[in-house]
Amino acid sequence: MDIKIGTSGFSFRDWVGKVYPKEIKKGEMLNYYINNFPFSALEINVSYYKLVSGAVYDSFVNRTPDTYDFIVKAYKGITHDVIEKGSWKFNPDYKVIDIFFRSLETIKKSGKLGGILFQFPPYFFPKRDTTTYLKLLKDKTEDIPVFVEFRNRYWEDNKYLNFLKDNDIDICTIDLPRLAKLPRYKPTVTGKNAYFRFHGRNKNWYDKNSDRYNYLYSNDEILNFKDDIIEIAQRTKKIYAFFNNCHAGKAVINAKMLVEAIENSYKS
């Protein structure tokens, strides 16, 4: 049974003085994260905001133990910008896709690349263009697991879940506020692995003046997640669980709680 837990990113200013020491420098955050938090995986999210070089991934690889896994979040040019706002035409930039995949060569060879996360926006709907696109992305990853996160409910239809199963694409189980249009929390497996992303349940999700990731899960909520993860772990190769409620270090607090809850379950 292989359960890997961590957070979605690690370099946040508002973690300083909360989960990082007050005097910590930005360049010291990764080492502190690795050496002081009981995690075995990390979601790299700098790769979502820009195309990074292979040297950046080398830095992650060289500073972590062999047992550490990284999930690389795909560049937004591959997930969000493929649909033109306004015209809503589906128009991927295949050159950008090639650049992104070439940058991953070293981390792939290291054996520490657990998979690639493709987080798609709410306006990425299931249709012929988008399912064909997912097949293309899967083909380019070769034997590296592909994880997809959708922000609308249309992908929950069995027709599309079966499509993901047929193509060995792992869907993310996501926890979000219980609001209209947002996907429901429903543990689902469509491939060899399982993937959980916990975004928090901030009811002000749509309020531009609020940090939507400002939410701390309660102990009871964490225990419910723990039960789901342990049940699914019986029938999957590996499980990843990441907390994205990153406001003021709350993701670290909740990830620690989940690690402890799972460890206690196996002790009893």
Image: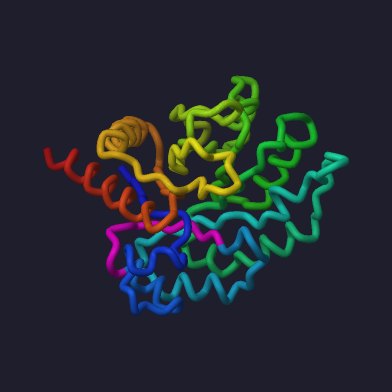
> Which residue is at the front of the view, 196 or 19?
19
The reply to whether residue 51 is visible in this rendering is: yes
The single residue placed furthest to the right in the displayed view is: 87
The single residue placed furthest to the front in the displayed view is: 209
Q: Which residues are magenta?
A: 35-45
- Residue 40, magenta (yes or no): yes
Q: Position of residue 108 (x, y in %)?
A: 54, 63
Residue found at x 54% / y 59%: 45
Residue found at x 81% / y 44%: 85
In this view, 61 is above or below 147:
below
Q: Quadrant of the N terminus?
A: top left
In this view, 64 is above or below 234:
below
- Residue 141, magenta (yes or no): no
Residue found at x 71% / y 48%: 80
Give left or right: position of 74 versus 192: right
Q: Position of residue 163 (x, y in %)?
A: 64, 28
In this view, 122 is above or below 141:
above
Residue found at x 73% / y 55%: 77
> Which residue is at the front of the view, 135 or 227?
227
Give left or right: position of 97 versus 67: right
Q: Position of residue 162 (x, y in %)?
A: 60, 25
Q: Quadrant of the C terminus?
A: top left
> Which residue is at the front of the view, 1 or 205?
205
Q: Position of residue 200 (x, y in %)?
A: 44, 41
